[in-house]
Amino acid sequence: MEPFYRTVIGLARTVFAAQGLKFTVTGAENIPAVGGAVIAMNHVGYMDFTYAGLPARTSKRYIRFMAKKEVFDHKISGPLMRAMKHIPVDRADGADSYRAAVAALRAGELVGVFPEATISRSFEIKGFKTGAVRMALEADVPIIPVVMWGSQRVWTKGHPKRLGRTKTPISIAVGEPIAPNASASELTAELHETMERMLRELQGSYVHEAGAYWVPARLGGTAPTLAEATALDDADTAARKARRAQKDAGTDR
């Protein structure tokens, strides 16, 4: 029993209802009722982690999400994240968060990971980091692929948030468990292929608006292509590294 986490979920569902969000969840039975598992999710919007936990409640499970350290440093969100036993990630040094995630998995927890690491501005599946798969291999637990679609319409990178009563439809699909029985590179490729297929299936049953910012270029929208989005991400990374180097240089003086 986790009264605090359960209360937060209850409050979140009240907010979702007030917003008129319409969830369609399939495959929730693929989340194991007991034991550890890596929950690997695609990332198209800032609110994804709040929606991704919904399928786990079918089996009365809670997901420990891996989130950037800055969220835990915030005076309001930090205490909430720690109380729900989420796992902070230091982008400059992720060794501690990796060990904490493996320990949680071995203890029978569900650990939520975004293998893309950051929001996909193209709304296509980006390249994957291998961390999610390596954790599953080390802890000897399955990987559960989860994809969602529509959450980018609520709040995504580079666009205003729409947190009012938007009645936005959001689709979530949970795939069958992937056993940790291959190399990290092979499993990462399998996970990427599986989630890409699942996402296209969700998109196929979703009504898209031609020319809309939240629709991939492939489907007639104005979102950047995957190549264009990758270039934007690379520029952001370079700028972040430059700021960090400048800050470090100032500290050394």
Image (spheres, rainbow, N blue to C red):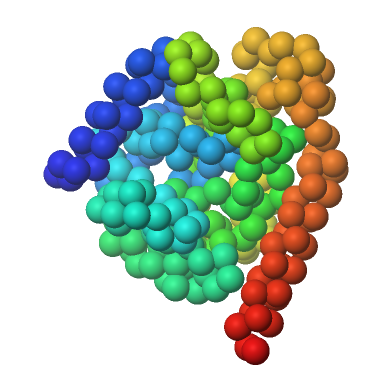
**In which quadrant is the C terminus drawn?**
bottom right
Q: Position of residue 102 (x, y in %)?
A: 41, 65
Q: How many numbered circles are shown?
A: 0
**In which quadrant is the N terminus drawn?**
top left
Task: Using the rendered view, name the quadrant where residue 210 is placed.
Answer: top right
Q: Position of residue 193 (x, y in %)?
A: 68, 41
Q: Position of residue 57 (x, y in %)?
A: 30, 33
Q: Describe residue 205's horizontal placement relative to residue 104 as left or right.
A: right
- The residue lying toward the viewer, choosing from 17 and 189, is 17
Image point (48%, 23%), residue name: 163
Residue furthest to the bottom in view is 253
Work out whether residue 35 can be spotted.
Answer: no
Image point (42%, 16%), residue name: 19
Q: Describe residue 1's horizontal placement relative to residue 165 as left or right.
A: left
Task: Using the rendered view, name the quadrant where residue 139 is placed.
Answer: bottom left
Work out whether residue 23 can be spotted.
Answer: yes
Q: Position of residue 113 (x, y in %)?
A: 50, 51
Image point (69%, 24%), residue name: 214
Q: Describe residue 165's horizontal placement relative to residue 249 as left or right.
A: left
- The residue lying toward the viewer, choosing from 61 and 75, is 75
Q: Is residue 171 above or below residue 209?
A: below
Image point (69%, 62%), residue name: 240
Q: Is residue 28 above or below residue 208?
A: below
